[in-house]
Amino acid sequence: MKTRLRSTLFAVALASSFIVPPVFAYDTAAWQAAQADFQRANAGESGAAADAAEKFAKLVAAEPTNPLLLAYLGSSESMQGRDAMFPWKKMKFVETGLADLDRALALLKPEHAQAPAGGVSVANEVKLTAASTFLGLPGFFNRADAGTKLVNELASQPGFATMPERYRSAVLKLTAKAKS
């Protein structure tokens, strides 16, 4: 589970490495600190997923209807499952993360498709984060189909060819993973 989740979440790390926070009410420094922990967690650093989840949870507490923050919180929580020692803790973290990712996807509105987030819309970043997490989970979580649907939607959207290279690369990498 660790290797599969780490390699899949690498695509999100790659895409999110160029993201600047969109115009929302949260603190830019707190966003950057949470993103730094998220990157460390993606690199496999023990404890970094918990640090990222804690920081994203504080950001979400200040802005509970922000789908971008919820998506990163959910992905961070899922990575905590990767790092947990006991199976029941692994399940709890992943299930909590999936619930937050589902909430983030449900909160997406048409205006999120227009809001810039480092060259891609908030909606696209949320979908990429969810797809990457879903595709990185073991099959018994039954999220591969949802991840495949999201990544195919991202790859086939109008204007995809003009989006930032890192983002396109992350989407294409996930598309290939979804086909395997």
Image (tube, rainbow, N blue to C red):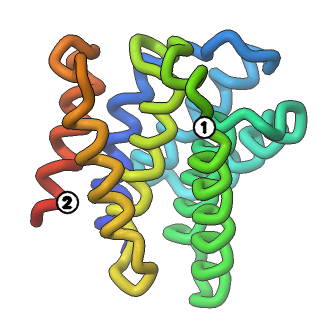
Looking at the rendered structure, the secondary structure element under dot 1 is: loop
Q: Earlier in the sequence, mark 2 or mark 1?
A: 1
Give the answer, above or below, for where 82 lies relative to 16: below
Foreground of the two, 31 or 74: 74
Quadrant of the rendering where the C terminus is positioned: bottom left
Quadrant of the rendering where the N terminus is positioned: bottom left
Residue 12 appears in the figure:
yes
Q: Residue 139 appears at what percent x and percent y?
A: 34, 81
- In the image, taking residue 75 as reference, residue 7 lies left or right, namely left
Please tell me whether mark 2 or mark 1 is closer to you in this view. Answer: 1
Tag 2: amino acid:
Ala
Tag 1: amino acid:
Leu
Q: Please identify the quarter of the rendering in which residue 157 is found.
A: top left
- In the image, taking residue 65 as reference, residue 170 lies left or right, namely left
Query: Label 1 near label 2: C-beta < 8 Å?
Result: no
Q: Residue 134 appears at what percent x and percent y?
A: 41, 62
Specify the farthest residue to the front: 110
- In the image, taking residue 156 as reference, residue 131 lies left or right, namely right
Residue 47 appears in the figure:
no
Q: Residues within 10 Å of mark 1 (few under 14, many from 20)?
A: some
Question: Residue at the spot x=35%, y=50% of the render?
Answer: 150
The residue under label 2 is 178
Q: Please identify the quarter of the rendering in which residue 124 is found.
A: top left
Q: Residue 96 appears at what percent x and percent y?
A: 68, 68
Count of numbered marks = 2
- In the image, taking residue 52 as reference, residue 163 lies left or right, namely left
Give the answer, above or below, for where 171 lies relative to 49: above
Q: Residues within 10 Å of mark 2 (few under 14, many from 20)?
A: some
The residue under label 1 is 108
Looking at the rendered structure, the secondary structure element under dot 2 is: helix
